[in-house]
Amino acid sequence: MTAVGRENHRAVEPASPRDIFHITTEAGWARAQAEGAYSASTRGLTLAQVGFVHCAFEEQVARVANSFFRGVAKLVVLRIAIDRLNAAVRYEEVEGGNELFPHVYGPLNLDAVVAIMPLPPDRDGTFTFTVPAGPYWAGPGDP
């Protein structure tokens, strides 16, 4: 799996009522709040460079984090309600894969982000992720 642009993806369009998730840093989320929209695609690449915002389903988050974000500090996971997005969501396979990932083809409007959850590494530096049953951040700086 690689973080690549749209030219290496095959579109598949199943309907999905599930929330989707995006990994970013606390600083990246704070920047989005200051700008009024989130316009990063994936680690080190912008929406303008890639054409979409890389997202994942809950069961894919830890694998994506371990593949692309090892060693990155202060990560958070944005929980995104797809029915609140202003941009289109497409479910696509990464080249050479057979697993669908949600991609948002436009900036994330901030009101579509329904939760922000910390993503600390385990002691060995790897990540695990499940949506917590209890409270999680409603936004940066909230308890």
Image (spheres, rainbow, N blue to C red):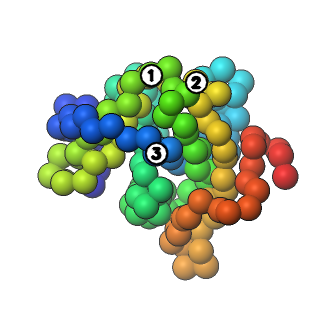
Q: Tell me the element at label 2.
A: strand
- Residue furthest to the bottom in view is 124
Disc 3 marks a residue whose amino acid type is: Arg
Q: Which mark is residue 87?
A: 1
The residue drawn where x is 33% and y is 37% is 15
The correct choice, above or below, for 133 with respect to 27 in the image is: below
Where does the N terminus fall, quadrant-wise?
bottom left
Q: Which mark is residue 18?
A: 3
Closer to us: 27 or 101: 101
Choose top left, top right, bottom left or bottom right for residue 49: top left
Q: Position of residue 94 (x, y in %)?
A: 23, 46
Label 2, residues with CA under 10 Å away: few <14, some 14-19, many ≥20: some
Query: Can residue 10 be seen by looking at this rendering?
Result: yes
Q: CA distance from mark 3 to mark 2?
A: 17 Å
Left or right: residue 10 compared with residue 66: left
Disc 2 marks a residue whose amino acid type is: Asn
Label 3, residues with CA under 10 Å away: few <14, some 14-19, many ≥20: few
Q: Tell me the element at label 3.
A: loop
Disc 1 marks a residue whose amino acid type is: Ala
Choose top left, top right, bottom left or bottom right for residue 54: top left
Instruction: Find out whether the residues at labels 1 and 2 contact each other: C-beta distance under 8 Å.
Output: yes
Mark 1 vs 3, N-terminal side: 3
Q: Position of residue 38 (x, y in %)?
A: 57, 28
The residue drawn where x is 61% and y is 53% is 75
Closer to us: 81 or 8: 81
Q: Say which residue label 2 marks.
A: 109
Mark 1 vs 2, N-terminal side: 1
Instruction: Find out whether the residues at labels 3 and 2 contact each other: C-beta distance under 8 Å.
Output: no
Question: Which of the two marks, 1 or 3, is nearer to us in this view?
Answer: 3
Left or right: residue 111 compared with residue 20: right
The residue drawn where x is 50% and y is 44% is 19
